[in-house]
Amino acid sequence: MSSTKRASPKEAGRASWHFRPDVPLRVSPFYDLPLKLGSILKYILRGWHPSGDRFYFLLIAIGIWAFFSPSVEQAAEFRLAWIFEIWVRNIVLVTVVAGGMHLYLFTFRRQQDEFRYDLRAYPAKGKGFLFGNQLWDNTFWTLVPGVAVWTAYEAIIWWAFANGIGTLITLDEHPVLFVGLILITPHWVTLYFYLQHRLLHTPLLYRWVHYRHHRNINLGPWSGLSQHPAEHMVDQADCFIFLLIPAHPVHAIFNLMFHALGASTSHTGYHQLGKSNSTRLAFGDFFHHLHHRYFDCNYGSLDVFWDRLFGTFHDGTEAGDEIIAERRRKLGSRRGV
């Protein structure tokens, strides 16, 4: 028998949530007034805890730069050999991460439904998915256009640094700036994500591009990068900020980890990996899972306050359900629906 803790009405609120974390969800303390420096420091340190994905993304980025990337000299000219090596490495990375979590969570069911948000079947079947199967669809859009764009952008960055486009710094010469950019990168990624994600929800771009990702109402690790090729191009383009400011390739690689691998860890459909009585990894994002269920809320993350400012913040409570429903009623009334 499964040891999964099923949510009581008091704990889960909405009966359709199998598991719900502590709510109400709160935006990061960066925007609290008056500023509470202790809360901000605690929030930052918690974000780098070894149980979270950010810590591992940085280790992977450093490892990639040191052992699995071309030298700056090699990248001075676009050559199929070194670009192909990056592509193979990226295929392996995303397959190990997304594929490994899928095997653990959905194929072998190692933690059953413990910490799972939604008990509806994943993968789903239907004509809305390529090959009629959500898993095959998600895997295709991840491994084909997703990895292609990731590889192309990384290759452009290596080539740009090799040709003096952008200011290349090193840890030895600029330790404060080097480390500072590492610390800022996760927050830059979340700010950019909100801006481009809100843009993708405009009617024209949603109809032609973003709809593909939103066919995934219930999620699995392969769902994160299951996107239209145009969305991949927009989503990952924030890495080019490091050609506009003094930086190092490891910063751009670290940035890309949040899109390439972070998409998988944030779309697991589970709050964390590991059972209650075992080592757990905080790979999961209830805030974004709410977006996939309700569609027109939580466009960003808890790092930024834009959703709260523009009335699209869902805090995971029943009151949050009603706020979103009321906003829809007002929008419908304005449109004469």
Image (spheres, grey):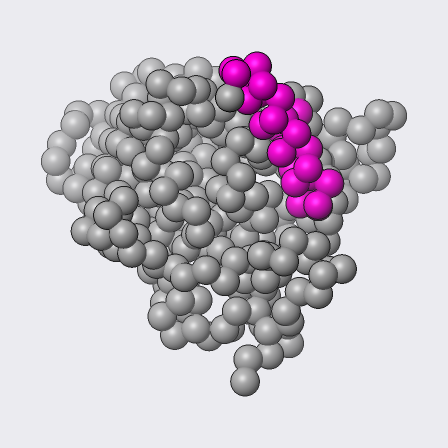
In screen coordinates, is 78 left or right of 291?
A: left
Residue in the foreground of this view, choosing between 258 and 243: 258
Q: Position of residue 94 (x, y in %)?
A: 33, 51
Q: Quadrant of residue 106?
A: bottom left
- The outermost residue toward the bottom is 1
* Residue at figure coordinates x 61%, y 26% from the top left: 329
* Residue at figure coordinates x 27%, y 44% from the top left: 128
Q: Position of residue 236 (x, y in %)?
A: 38, 30
Q: Position of residue 162 (x, y in %)?
A: 29, 24
Residue in the foreground of this view, choosing between 179 and 146: 146
Q: Is-magenta flag for residue 228?
A: no
Residue in the foreground of this view, choosing between 117 and 66: 117
Q: Position of residue 267 (x, y in %)?
A: 46, 49
Q: Quadrant of residue 305?
A: top right
* Residue at figure coordinates x 43%, y 52% from the top left: 219
Q: Can the viewer see residue 154 in this picture?
A: no
* Residue at figure coordinates x 49%, y 55% from the top left: 269
Looking at the image, residue 171 lies above or below residue 317: above
Q: Is-magenta flag for residue 316?
A: yes
Q: Identify the magenta region.
A: 311-336
In screen coordinates, is 326 left or right of 165?
A: right
- The outermost residue toward the left is 80
The overriding secondary structure of the stretch rendered in magenta is helix
In screen coordinates, is 200 left or right of 155?
A: right
Residue in the foreground of this view, choosing between 63 and 110: 110
